[in-house]
Image (cartoon, rainbow, N blue to C red):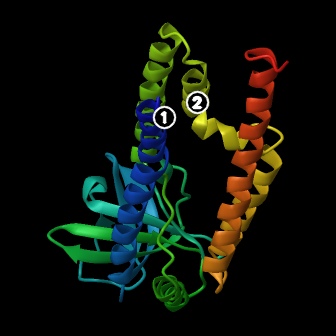
Amino acid sequence: MIIRIALIAGVAMLAYVIVPAVTSRVASARRLRLLSRLKNGIPCTFADIVDDTPLFKPDRPRGPDDAPLSLAPARTAFLLLDKTGRIRSLAWPEISAILAGTTALVYPLGDGRHACLFHEELRAQDAEKRVAAAVLGGFAPERPDPVKPISVAAGAFAEFVILVDALKRPDSDAIAVLALLAVFGKALPWCPPGLFLTLAATSIARRARGEQKSRRLETVGLLVGGLAVALNVALILFVIARVWLPIP
């Protein structure tokens, strides 16, 4: 039994916590490294998308023909600086929603690669100051982690296999209960009554991205989020104990 309990806990920690945390940190470090290279960009205006290639008109003439800049989507990192100063990565489908005439900074990165920062600042220098402040504060551009849903799905499937195996064995009710909790482990924070604490933790974490004392706020957010999970687990165990394993 101890081995199976350890297996349930290990799978949950690996698939739900460790893998998403590691991949997120690695991706954030790469995006922050990219951000640190964005200096002395070319002020441009977004013109149009032709043949799936975005075109930018430089604010200052670059030569006699003054041809627009064309950026290959596969070799360009697109970023958006919003009015609050936050920077997030843009997926290619989002580019089509950007209006023609939007100001941007284009940065040659070498080997035919570019970075493009869309912004709404009055001056390009102000946008670059915000980028420098983000690098100094360690705030990497935000972007959904593509590895996380795969890891969570694989973990949930592994926990379901353990649950099915436990249901076939006599005297494995405790293992089945733990495996059942692990299957829905990632959904636990979003179930009531812990949902309200999760929303509070999410709000704290979002505020931490723009605060100087972000580490302390992040710790508070993690504690509140952990309390939400603990509350929901306690409630589920109480219901299971009453219905599945009736208390005399």
Q: Secondary structure at mark 1?
A: helix
At 36% across and 87% down in the image, what residue appears? Answer: 39
Residue topped by disc 2: 178
Residue topped by disc 1: 5
Q: CA distance from mark 1 to mark 2?
A: 8 Å
Mark 1–mark 2 CB contact (< 8 Å): yes
Callout 2 crowding tier (Cα within 10 Å): few <14, some 14–19, many ≥20: many
- Residue 182 lies, with reference to residue 174, above or below; the image says below
Residue 247 coordinates in the image, percent (x, y): 82, 21
- Residue 165 lies, with reference to residue 45, above or below; the image says above
- Residue 145 lies, with reference to residue 108, above or below; the image says above
Residue located farthest toward the front when viewing the structure as drawn: 248
Dividing the picture into quarters, in which one does residue 81 lie? Answer: bottom right
Residue 82 coordinates in the image, percent (x, y): 61, 70
At 41% across and 67% down in the image, what residue appears? Answer: 28
Dividing the picture into quarters, in which one does residue 181 lie? Answer: top right
Question: On the rendered structure, is 206 left or right of 235?
Answer: left
Residue 33 coordinates in the image, percent (x, y): 34, 76
Name the residue type under label 1.
Answer: Ile
Dividing the picture into quarters, in which one does residue 22 lie? Answer: bottom left
